[in-house]
Image: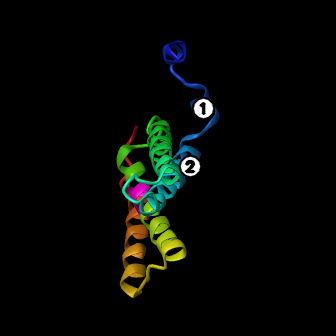
């Protein structure tokens, strides 16, 4: 692994572009977070393993995206899309209710991500 750092890229980093890495990171984070209730405080091994591997994968993939995309943009997309994903998973898997305020909040987050993309993107 040390040899790969010397040339600057790990094999996975060569294959993924920053946007794909970010979307995969978000999917891994949503999976990990959705598995937290099933882990029952890390007392159940399989859901606990999904949580740990999901978060580790998510942060690794996010670090790949940060090599090409600005931090503010990555984190805005990460948190916005992640929040929507978690809300939908809570509704689908755990029967949690989504109301009008939930949808308004998700819409505002989506609008914030769009504004950041259009007007707040700094050079990287």
Give the residue drawn at x 45%, y 71%.
87
Per the model, the C-alpha gap separating discs 2 and 1 is 12 Å
Residue 76 drawn at (x, y percent): 38, 56
The outermost residue toward the front is 43
Height in image: 44 above or below 11? below
Q: Is residue 117 visible?
A: no
> Counting other residues with Cα less than 10 Å from the Cα at mark 2, is it few (<14), some (14-19), or many (20 or more)?
some
- Say which of 42 and 84 sits in front: 42
Left or right: 41 with respect to 6?
A: left
Height in image: 108 above or below 99? above
Left or right: 14 with respect to 90?
A: right
6 drawn magenta:
no
The residue that label 2 is drawn on is 24
The residue that label 1 is drawn on is 12
Magenta residues span 76-80
Residue 37 drawn at (x, y percent): 42, 63
């Amino acid at each position: 692994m040390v040899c790969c750092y010397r040339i600057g890229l790990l094999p996975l980093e060569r294959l993924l572009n920053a946007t794909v890495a970010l979307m995969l990171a978000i999917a891994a984070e949503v999976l990990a977070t959705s598995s937290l209730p099933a882990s029952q405080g890390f007392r159940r091994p399989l859901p606990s393993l999904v949580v740990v591997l999901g978060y580790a994968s998510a942060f690794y993939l996010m670090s790949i995206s940060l090599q090409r995309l600005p931090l503010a943009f990555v984190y805005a997309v990460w948190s916005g899309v992640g929040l929507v994903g978690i809300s939908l998973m809570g509704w689908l898997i755990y029967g949690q209710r989504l109301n009008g305020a939930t949808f308004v909040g998700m819409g505002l987050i989506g609008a914030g991500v769009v504004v950041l993309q259009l007007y707040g993107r700094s050079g990287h």
